[in-house]
């Protein structure tokens, strides 16, 4: 038994996290069963459409259009526990809160996302938002990315980094590069654009990686693989990278940083954690591997899929079906197949829509070659997906059109 805390409340279902994954589950449950006792633990007053920050950084979306008040997106019938999760006691069916209280449950859904480890890069926190250092991974910094791109001159050095996987939206680091490079091209500026990637390829799925090799080459940008950003000297405008041959230092005028990311500490230090500190779940059913009444989805799990909004869109109906079955209700049960998608903004007005499943299997929702960037996908990225997020997904609506089809001809 864990040390008891005062239990302030008990709920049939407790959802830890009021982000994309948590609210999608809560809304879906309450759409079908409005009287169901569902509580959502979420400390923040703000909710963000984070995929839009790439467009903000490119000057193609206003930052304020990616923001809503948490109160405005919380399902009406849900109980909002405005507190932070401080610990999990699954043997006692309890979540401990930062306030010192505890919340007990019959069923628990963990949807805490991941944490961005800004402090893991020496010198980064104190120079973010100044000295040419930016990141589209923060709401307040994405506009600075566009400001920097518009201010670069001939011969300037623009560096873009990507850390070790997993991260949320693995394509986002290079999206920032492409939109900046396209902005420079349209301005007639000849700058030195470089991509410093801790990994060994442009993308984890070979069919798309080969296409992106051509796209980055088309901008005259230089990819550097096996380069891991470890330190930043903002005033000197220098970035330090760890390589197989030791450390190298590069000068910059603009540095777009994507820091390392990991499971939230509160999960790492809990009985729910598996390898790497992520919540340990069955990769197809999203049920916990040790606790029968615990479920998890989204960025906080150890499922071997891309950590994207598209993945959550496919995951939450699966989890809800499992949970309804456990509640004794009739429900359609499905399996999550690892679907993920990354709409890569390779230029202003052009998107390469990369879709895939577990094992790097290429799939496509449209009868087109998915390796080709197209203008017809831009309205999806810039208007369609945001609208579906706010009005469909956060309302718990499940949609499966168009259905992705396997592309065995493209799967390596």
Image (cartoon, rainbow, N blue to C red):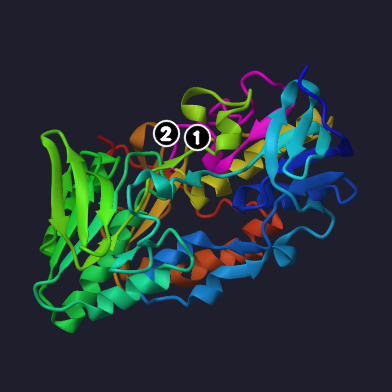
Labelled disc at residue 358: 2
Q: Magenta stretch: give its range.
A: 278-306
* Residue at x-position 72% and y-position 43%: 98
Q: Which secondary structure is most common in the magenta stretch?
A: loop
Give the mark count.
2
> On the rendered image, what quadrant is the N terminus found in?
top right
Compare residues 66 and 83 and report the one nearer the observer: 83
Seen as rendered, the residue at the extreme bottom is 187
SS label for mark 2: helix
- Asked if residue 156 is positioned above or below residue 176 in the image, the reply reads below
Q: Position of residue 313 (x, y in %)?
A: 57, 49
Picture coordinates of residue 16 (x, y %)?
A: 69, 42
Q: Nearer the viewer, residue 124 or 169?
A: 124
The answer to whether residue 297 is left or right of residue 343 is right
Check contact, mark 1 vs mark 2: CB within 8 A: yes
Q: Nearer the viewer, residue 393 or 82?
A: 82
- Can the viewer see residue 17 in this picture? yes
Task: Tell me which label, 1 or 2, sits earlier in the chain.
Answer: 1
């Amino acid at each position: 038994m864990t040390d008891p805390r005062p239990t302030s409340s008990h709920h049939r279902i407790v959802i830890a996290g009021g982000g994309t994954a948590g609210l999608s589950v809560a809304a879906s449950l309450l759409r079908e069963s409005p009287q169901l006792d569902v509580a959502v633990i979420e400390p923040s007053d703000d909710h963000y459409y984070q995929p839009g920050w790439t467009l903000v950084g490119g000057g193609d979306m206003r930052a304020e259009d990616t923001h809503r008040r948490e109160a405005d997106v919380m399902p009406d019938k849900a109980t909002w526990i405005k507190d932070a999760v401080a610990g999990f006691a699954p043997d006692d069916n309890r979540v401990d809160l930062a306030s010192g209280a505890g919340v007990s449950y019959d069923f628990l859904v963990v949807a805490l996302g991941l944490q961005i480890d800004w402090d893991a890069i020496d010198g980064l926190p104190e120079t973010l938002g100044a000295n040419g250092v930016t990141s589209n991974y923060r709401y307040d910094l994405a506009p600075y990315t566009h400001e920097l791109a518009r201010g670069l001159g001939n011969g300037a050095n623009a560096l873009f980094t990507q850390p070790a996987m997993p991260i949320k939206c693995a394509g986002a680091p290079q999206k920032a590069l492409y939109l900046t490079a396209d902005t420079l091209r349209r301005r007639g500026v000849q700058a030195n654009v470089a991509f410093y990637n801790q990994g060994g390829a442009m993308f984890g799925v070979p069919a798309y990686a080969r296409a992106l090799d051509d796209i980055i080459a088309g901008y005259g940008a230089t990819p550097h693989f096996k380069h891991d950003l470890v330190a930043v000297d903002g005033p000197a405008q220098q970035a330090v990278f760890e390589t197989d041959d030791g450390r190298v230092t590069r000068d910059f005028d603009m540095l777009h940083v994507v820091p390392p990311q990991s499971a939230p500490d509160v999960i790492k230090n809990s009985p729910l954690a598996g390898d790497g500190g992520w919540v340990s779940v069955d990769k197809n059913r999203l049920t916990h591997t040790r606790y029968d009444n615990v479920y998890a989805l989204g960025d906080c799990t150890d499922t071997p899929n891309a950590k994207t909004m598209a993945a959550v869109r496919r995951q939450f109906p699966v989890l809800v079906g499992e949970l309804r079955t456990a509640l004794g209700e009739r429900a359609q049960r499905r399996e999550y197949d690892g679907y993920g998608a990354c709409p890569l903004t390779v230029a202003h007005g052009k998107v390469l829509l990369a879709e895939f499943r577990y094992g790097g299997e290429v799939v496509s929702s449209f009868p087109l070659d998915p390796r080709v960037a197209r203008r017809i996908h831009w309205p999806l990225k810039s208007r369609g997906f945001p609208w579906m997020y706010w009005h469909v997904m956060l309302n718990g609506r499940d949609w499966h059109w168009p259905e992705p089809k396997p592309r065995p001809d493209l799967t390596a």
